[in-house]
Image: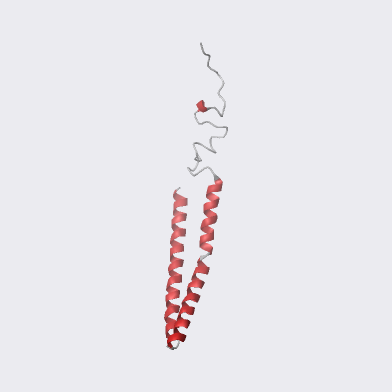
């Protein structure tokens, strides 16, 4: 004949997921807002998003400079004056602003997902 223990520890398997602080963690989620319980996961995602957003200016500047350099090289090779440099400057500006718009879209989607989640 086997006797059952009347004591239930917080760490036992049959405790039904109860913890000392049920408002903090319940099955990997925060009971109050439904977000992931690990704050480091959210901090890491926010840091990655901030790093990606901070590189937008660099991307714009490099696009313009690369466009200018390609245009200048083609102008000196074909002796066309400033026309190819101006054309590739325009291409660089378009590429740079396209990168800015993509970064803004990513930031909006990330903020929307954070507000939803």
Question: Eyeballing the image, is 96 above or below 77?
Answer: above
Which picture quadrant has residue 80? bottom left
Q: Please give the name of the residue rendered at 50% of the width and 26% of the height, measured from the top-left corner.
A: 14
Residue 110 position in % (x across, y down) = 46, 55
Residue at x 45% of width, y 74% of height? 93
Most extreme residue toward the top is 1
- Residue 69 higher or lower than 41, as above or below: below
Marks counted in the figure total 0
Q: Camera-side residue: 50 or 82?
A: 82
Q: Is residue 28 above or below residue 70?
A: above
State how the image is colored: secondary structure
Q: Relative to 104, is 43 above or below?
A: above
Tell me residue 34's x, y (percent).
47, 42
Front residue of 112 and 59: 59
- Which x, y percent locates residue 112? 44, 54
Q: Which residue occupies 43% across, 79% down?
A: 88
Q: Residue at x 57, y 21 (%)?
A: 7
- Which residue is nearer to you in this view: 34 or 66? 66
- Where is residue 99 drawn, in percent x and y? 45, 67
Tell which of 65 and 43 is nearer to you.
65
* Quadrant in the picture for residue 91: bottom left
């Amino acid at each position: 004949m086997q006797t059952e223990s009347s004591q239930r520890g917080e760490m036992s398997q049959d405790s039904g997921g109860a913890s000392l602080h049920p408002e903090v963690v319940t099955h990997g989620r925060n009971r109050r807002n439904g977000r992931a319980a690990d704050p480091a996961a959210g901090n890491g995602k926010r840091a990655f998003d901030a790093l990606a957003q901070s590189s937008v200016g660099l991307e714009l500047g490099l696009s313009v400079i690369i466009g200018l350099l390609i245009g200048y090289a083609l102008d000196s090779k074909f002796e066309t004056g400033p026309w190819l440099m101006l054309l590739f400057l325009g291409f660089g500006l378009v590429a740079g602003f396209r990168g800015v718009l993509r970064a803004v879209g990513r930031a909006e989607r990330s903020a929307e997902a954070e507000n939803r989640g």
